[in-house]
């Protein structure tokens, strides 16, 4: 198995963008590809991109020919396609995995659409690796807390159905641990979901450094906090090891990111882990060291690439070429330290 491939995400051009108050306009797929293609550090460029399957980048109901044209565009910029993001949220195709039967059916339809697109990209030859990402699409934890056990069971059952769909298409789903999504808002609750589904060959975990850092602080689940905000290094690393030891066996997709300990968001996607530039002076994470906790034995879990997530960066940051070079350097450091198999 070769060294880990380095991917950039396309969804920072979409997530948190829009025409609501305080939002900036979306950045087109082609512009995001061009910004990624321009990055280079010591002769190394990005190998591929991870891709969000929704408008304005992609119509999830696009024809086979339209999807092949998108694959041509991405390949033409010099990139492979990796992990895909299913449009599971209300306002896209899907709806809450914890909701009514009708809402859950919408969620499963979004997974079916993603599997269809994955098959087209795979057969085209543009998609070489990766999983399909989901979350519970139930924003916030208040409703979940009304009956945590019952609501976790509903999410588990939805995810089981989704995992069966994915397996039937030769795909794997990765549930992203992000504190804003019900049932996935703490490391312990996330583990309950993964173990409840119990289909590791079809549904695993996607670890994002920015989001999982807030797991250690127990931001949306103080009862599961592993450190307090004024922690010392001597306290942090054992706590980080406890979290990663629990979730790493399930981890099949990995996001390199930085976090300053704050939550952030825009529009309907708020109160989530704040992604910061790789060199942010307020960043709390030793990116390379933290990545090593997640990437131990990565090949055994089928991980072939890592991806940067700069979700909800301001457009000015995304349009700055230095942003992508700094990120690429951080990813090279992770790969060189932990990703040579």
Image (tube, rainbow, N blue to C red):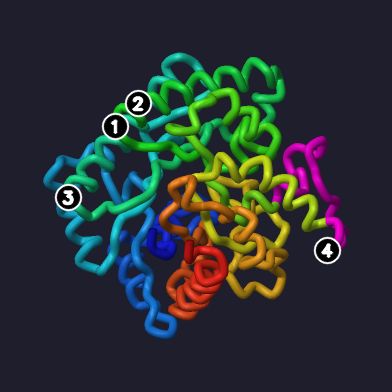
Structural distance between the alpha carbons of marks 2 and 1? 7 Å
Q: Residue at x 47, y 23 (%)?
A: 160
Residue marked by disc 2: 165
Residue marked by disc 3: 124
Residue marked by disc 1: 169
Tell me whether the residue at label 2 lies in contact with that at label 1, contact meaning CB atoms closer than 8 angstroms: yes
Q: Give the magenta-colored segment's residue range.
A: 214-235
Structural distance between the alpha carbons of marks 3 and 4? 48 Å
Q: Quadrant of residue 7?
A: bottom left
What secondary structure is found at the residue carrying circle 3?
Answer: helix
The circle drawn on residue 75 is none
The circle drawn on residue 233 is 4
Tell me whether the residue at label 2 lies in contact with that at label 3, contact meaning CB atoms closer than 8 angstroms: no
Confirm whether the magenta stretch covers residue 33. Answer: no
Q: Quadrant of the N terminus?
A: bottom left
Is residue 91 in view?
no
Side of 105 where 312 appears, left or right: right
What secondary structure is found at the residue carrying circle 2?
Answer: helix
Q: Is residue 33 above or below residue 173?
A: below
Q: Residues within 10 Å of mark 4 (few under 14, many from 20)?
A: few
Q: Is residue 88 above or below residue 265?
A: above
Q: Residues within 10 Å of mark 2 (few under 14, many from 20)?
A: many
Q: Residue at x 39, y 20 (%)?
A: 105
Q: Quadrant of residue 195?
A: top right
Q: Residues within 10 Å of mark 1 (few under 14, many from 20)?
A: some
Tell me whether the residue at label 3 lies in contact with that at label 4, contact meaning CB atoms closer than 8 angstroms: no
């Amino acid at each position: 198995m070769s060294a880990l491939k380095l991917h950039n995400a396309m969804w920072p051009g979409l997530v948190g963008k829009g025409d609501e108050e305080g939002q900036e306009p979306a950045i087109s797929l082609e512009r995001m590809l061009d910004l990624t293609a321009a990055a280079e550090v010591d002769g190394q460029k990005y190998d591929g991109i991870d891709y969000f399957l929704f408008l304005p980048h992609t119509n999830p109901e696009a024809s086979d020919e339209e999807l092949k044209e998108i694959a041509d565009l991405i390949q033409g910029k010099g990139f492979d396609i990796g992990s895909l993001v299913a449009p599971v949220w209300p306002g896209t195709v899907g709806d809450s995995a914890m909701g009514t039967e009708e809402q859950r059916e919408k969620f499963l339809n979004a997974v079916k659409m993603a599997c269809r697109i994955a098959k087209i990209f795979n057969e085209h030859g543009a998609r070489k690796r990766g999983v399909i990402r989901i979350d519970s699409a139930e924003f916030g934890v208040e409703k979940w807390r009304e009956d945590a056990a019952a609501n976790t069971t509903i999410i588990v059952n939805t995810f089981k159905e989704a995992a069966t769909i994915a397996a039937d298409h030769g795909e794997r789903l990765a549930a992203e641990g992000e504190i804003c999504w019900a049932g996935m808002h703490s490391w312990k609750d996330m583990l309950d979901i993964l173990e409840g589904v119990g289909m590791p060959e079809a549904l695993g975990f996607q670890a994002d450094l920015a989001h999982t850092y807030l797991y250690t602080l127990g931001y949306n689940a103080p009862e599961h906090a592993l450190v307090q905000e004024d922690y010392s290094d001597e306290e942090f690393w054992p706590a980080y090891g406890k979290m990663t030891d629990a979730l790493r066996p399930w981890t099949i997709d990995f996001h390199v990111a930085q976090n300053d300990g704050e939550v952030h968001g825009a529009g309907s996607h708020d109160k989530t882990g704040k992604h910061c530039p790789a060199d942010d002076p307020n960043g709390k994470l030793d990116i390379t060291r933290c990545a090593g906790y997640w990437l131990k034995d990565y090949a055994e879990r089928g991980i072939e690439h890592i991806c940067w997530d700069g979700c909800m960066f301001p457009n000015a940051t995304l349009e700055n070429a230095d942003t992508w070079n700094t990120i690429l350097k951080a990813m090279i450091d992770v790969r060189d330290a932990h990703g040579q198999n």
